Amino acid sequence: MITALDRRSLLAGSLVLGAGGLALPRLAFAQGAGHRNLLFVLLRGAADGMAMLAPVGDPGLEALRGASLADYEGAGRLGSFFAVHPALAGVAAAAQSGEALFVHAAATAYRERSHFDGQNLLETGGTAPYATRDGWLNRLTALLNEGAPTPLRALAIAQAVPLALRGDAPVSNYAPSALPAASDDLLARVSQLYAADGELGALWQRALETKAMAEDDGLRNLRDASAAGELAASLMRDAGGARIGMIELGGWDTHANQRGAFARSARGLDALLAAYKTGMGAAWADTLVVVATEFGRTARLNGTGGTDHGTAGAALLMGGGVRGGRVIADWPGLAERQLFEGRDLAPTTALESVLAGAVAEHLRLDPERAMARLFPGRSAKPLSGIIRS
């Protein structure tokens, strides 16, 4: 039986996101954390939470979204109040089977609606844009490193390491290249050159290991979101694989013709998550996927059938251990007087509390300590009850 709405009064925050099309996803990974897996999927561009999970039970929705509500006829429901976008059919099925839940009306502490500033705040976990230099996922890696018999490693499969993974914890990165591959003879000569250098030699060997792992798992064939999910699973499912990962997906800045654009991006996200779940196999039981965006979008459609930068949005949590089949929300309502600044879904849940609470429960960390380390300066209480005990 699916619970329609878990009403929780949590500290408000604000959520902001960045632009881009559904382009080649970029990934990042870290080793350690026992056999538990964490995948963070960042939707850059401000994904519309009210499109992802439409509050069809709110009487104010029709006046704001009009004809677009026809898209949700026959869509998967979470109780009578919420409907999952039909392009997220796999996510809806996971919710029905109790392996996915949504947190709605969630946002970080940011309120100014700039993609760059909002993404910076979400990735650093700071209290103001550019006030913190390292990322919350890097700090999580360092936290898991404490007392670990073997130092944890972080790996970014991207042209540059995402800000969420930058910091003092060691990070490597790898990205596909259109240039011809280096010959084995050249690689061997460089290895000899660096062999006597303690620092460069270790870095070079790590780079060779990363290259071999990525090529063995078909990185050069990474063409779409589904392939990205398969690749992430291939690097994370085994005992010696990565334990913390990150994927970035763009295409969510839907200022015009949102119905078509959102559906395309949502289908890509759904395919990625489905491929990742399938690829994880038995390891899915010990896996948590967190999907978040930097902020939501305006509650009302604009004159071009799109939405503009907003405030609160929705986060998605999936995994074999998730207490799914429900929506966690202190729903603010969609009447004109209930909208934030007369235009946006009002934030009632701090996104930082969602991230810290989910990660702490899944990785068996103390929730308060996780909140203090990952999101210093935020007074929100970590969300609890996400993972089955």
Image (cartoon, grey):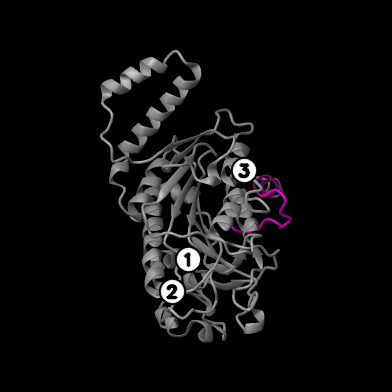
Residue drawn at (57%, 35%) of the image: 169
Q: Pointer 1: what residue? A: 95
Q: Residue furthest top?
A: 196
Q: Amino acid at mark 1?
A: Ala
Residue at position x 45%, y 52% in the image: 248
In the rendered image, residue 241, in percent from the top left (x then y), is placed at: 44, 37
- The answer for how far apart the CA atoms under marks 1 and 2 are is 9 Å
Q: Residues within 10 Å of mark 1 (few under 14, many from 20)?
A: many
In magenta segment, residue 385: yes
Say whether disc 1 or disc 2 marks the residue closer to the N-terminus. Answer: 2
Q: Is 156 displayed left or right of 148 in the figure?
A: left
Question: Circle 3 sits on which residue?
Answer: 133
Image quadrant assignment for residue 262:
bottom left
The residue identified by callout 2 is 76
Residue 7 painted magenta: no
- Residue 141 horizontal/vertical position (percent): 57, 39
- The amino acid type of the residue labelled 2 equals Gly
Q: Is 379 or 340 nearer to us in this picture?
A: 340
Disc number lying in front (3 or 1): 3
The boundaries of the magenta stretch are 370-388
Q: Are marks 1 and 2 in contact (CB under 8 Å)?
A: yes
